[in-house]
Amino acid sequence: MTPPVKRRSGQHHGDLRRVLEEAALSLVAERGPNGFTLAEASRRAGVSVAAPYKHFADRDALLAVLAERGYREQRIRFTRAMEGSASPVEQLAAFAAAYVRFAAQERALFDITFSAGLDKAERPSLASAGEELLAALLPAAARITPGEEAAYDLLLRIAAAAHGLSVFLRQGLFGVSEEALDVTAERAAQTARDIAEASQTA
């Protein structure tokens, strides 16, 4: 069990938001995105149960901020991985491999992003973060298949395959070693290549 985040004597309230976010991440890692209360996050952070309301209206508001962080982190990781090749097929393969690594290495952010049940229609900034991620990925798919709808469908199929492999890896179906992560990432990359290449010849 992760111990409470100890608050240093004289710690300024400027740190409150950060320590609450980190406390929430540790709780999500243990219990899932819906397995804790804002009061529990407060206690884990070492602050009063009233303190979070300076920044967050409720638990979902805290989760939404973390989901935005998750989208930003994915965009950084995925675009960095895709920069390694000029080929759109290889760019999508790199995206799929990076997706698996993100799911394994940032479990709490991954779970919040996909399992917290947050309504983007009620959270414009969260919706915007998701749209920015999509906008970073779509150009590679659009170079393979014409039309925005077809490009989106291609990207969706590759992401779905990478997501499924990520879940299987986290469930231990492929083992729990670092080698299992590497093998699964490459499996996701090869699956992405197969899907993209099939779209090129369709």
Image (cartoon, grey):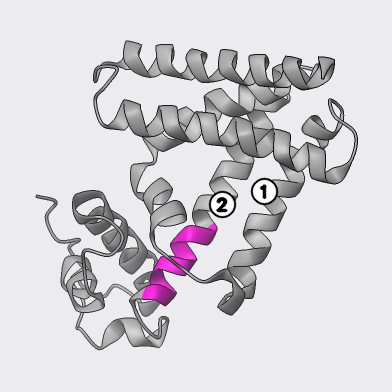
On residue 133, which mark appears?
A: 1
* Left-right relation of 145 to 19: right
Q: Earlier in the sequence, mark 1 or mark 2?
A: 2
Please tell me which residue lies in front, 41 or 103.
103
- Residue at position x 43%, y 76% in the image: 61
Q: Is residue 71 above or below residue 82?
A: below
Identify the residue at horizontal 39%, vertical 41% (top origin). Answer: 106
The kind of secondary structure element at disc 2 is helix
Taking the spot 31% from the left edge, 60% from the top edge, the residue there is 33
User: Is residue 190 positioned above or below 143 on the image?
Assistant: above
Residue appearing at x 44%, y 61% in the figure: 66
Q: Residue 67: within the magenta?
A: yes
- Residue 134 in the image: state x and y as whole percent: 70, 48
The answer to whether mark 1 and mark 2 are in CB contact below 8 A is: yes
Residue farthest to the right, as pictured? 146
Q: Which mark is residue 71?
A: 2
